[in-house]
Image (spheres, rainbow, N blue to C red):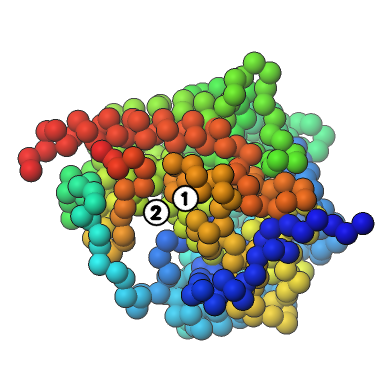
Amino acid sequence: MTPTPEWPGDLLDTATVEAKGFSPRPFREFVLKVHQRCNLACDYCYVYEMADQSWRDRPPMMSPGVWRAAAQRICDHARTHGLAEVRVVLHGGEPLLAGRDRLRELIEDVRGALAAACRVRLSLQTNGLLLDEPMLDLMLECGVEVGVSLDGPSEANNLHRRYADGRSSHHAVDRALARLGEAAYRPIFAGLLCTVDPRADPIETYDALLAYRPPVIDFLLPHANWSRLPHRPRGAGRTPYGDWLVAVFDRWYGAPYKETGVRVLEEIINLVLGGASRCEQVGLSPVTVAVVESDGAIEQVDSLKSAYPGAGAMGLNVATDAFDRAIRHPGVMARQLGVEALCDTCRACPIHEICGAGHYAHRYRDGAGFLNPTVYCADMVRIIEHVHQRVSADLTGRMATTPA
Amino acid sequence: MDWTSDPDDGTEEHERSLPDVGRTPLPALISPHRTPSPDDTVLDAAMHRIAREVAEGAEVHAAFGNIP
């Protein structure tokens, strides 16, 4: 049986799009899958627990040959497009499983290759289990910012973030965050990443994360789509994720001073004020992220692994292909088309410029592709309308008291 | 992971379009040259950000309901 054509892979005519004047944006953020394995077994992980299982066929660790080829391709890409700065994210699996010696070698190679081309901002996203003092010293020495994944207090974190044998990971991460919060390491503390579960109390979750004094908190909706629906707790109402974010918004926004950044909420406010977004969860700004897997494969954003097997694949590899080949891939181009990449339902929605159809991975439906509203549509409307109402009311008050 | 999106094109040489602030009075509420304070509220910080982005050449538009 012939598979149904899906958008954008089978249906977006990139030549026609370019002929109409669209010019692909260069990549600015490069995610290196330094290590493909993990020392946790989180049950919501898009790498191991969802549709794409390609990690099984890739080398557990990225080799020096692959990261050097990747660094040279990034350098070439930056030069070709005159980029002033690129961001390189060390990612996994769990990147710290690579060990300090290998990470030092990789970081030095990447910095060395890019030194003559542009500035490079290096960061690392970890579950924190191996974030001991020697590792933090290395990151500090090498100027690598460190983000840590944690879902809140122990009870909330234990809902999903456990070892393979079922043990809680909270205590170990708590210790690591205490170290990262020390004065010596604070300059490299990038922030916390928390996946929302409506069963967890939103205020307790926010306050537990805030206790680590992170510069920013990222709240993510768990990856789901129209063919693999999100978990909605019984009795939680029509918009449990939106309600959860509203509670966090009110706690955060209502504080007497700004206690920390909450990225998705800050981006919604900026969009409500008429600006543009700098995160892929909301808005219509172009996404300029490329992933390099441990075998050198150049792929689209890794969250697509939640949609179907091979969703992020482009058939390209840093050993043989420049990143410029990837920016003309339909899947990459679709992330840069703004409103042109929205379905008719979204275009007719009054908040589509703010919502931007939500997270791209959450729009997927088997047999149709990504030309759909997000599966969290009602939740997005709930949080965006709430932010709009509060910000609008406050601004109206300020306008009334501001001299013309 | 929550990856970034990039409203600007990343080149320092990029010639940005002139700011279009005529459709919204928001940037007038706070100066981009004001030094942010630790006592700033979330809204203060948000206003400062958009005022700074406008000063740097970002186009601002009334995205939703022509606020305020």
Where is A120 relative to A362, above or below? below
Q: Quadrant of residue A294?
A: bottom right
Camera sees residue A376: yes
- The residue beneath circle 1 is A283
Is A36 positioned to the left or the right of A286 in the image?
right
**Are discs 2 and 1 less than 8 Å apart at CB?**
yes
Along the viewing direction, whichever of A326 and A171 lies nearer the viewer: A326
Mark 2, secondary structure of its residue: loop
Q: Chain of mark 2?
A: A
Residue appearing at x 64%, y 78% in the figure: A325
Find the distance from the CA under tag 2 to the CA under tag 1: 7 Å
Q: Identity of the amino acid at label 2? A: Ala
Residue appearing at x 40%, y 65% in the figure: B8
- The residue beneath circle 2 is A276
- Residue A244 in the image, given as x and y percentages of width and height: 53, 27
Where is B23 relative to A240, above or below? below
- Label 2 vs 1, first from the N-terminus: 2
Graded by Cα atoms within 10 Å as few (under 14), some (14 to 19) or many (20 or more), the crowding at tag 2 reads: many
Placement of the C terminus of chain A among the 4 image quadrants: top left
Graded by Cα atoms within 10 Å as few (under 14), some (14 to 19) or many (20 or more), the crowding at tag 1 reads: many
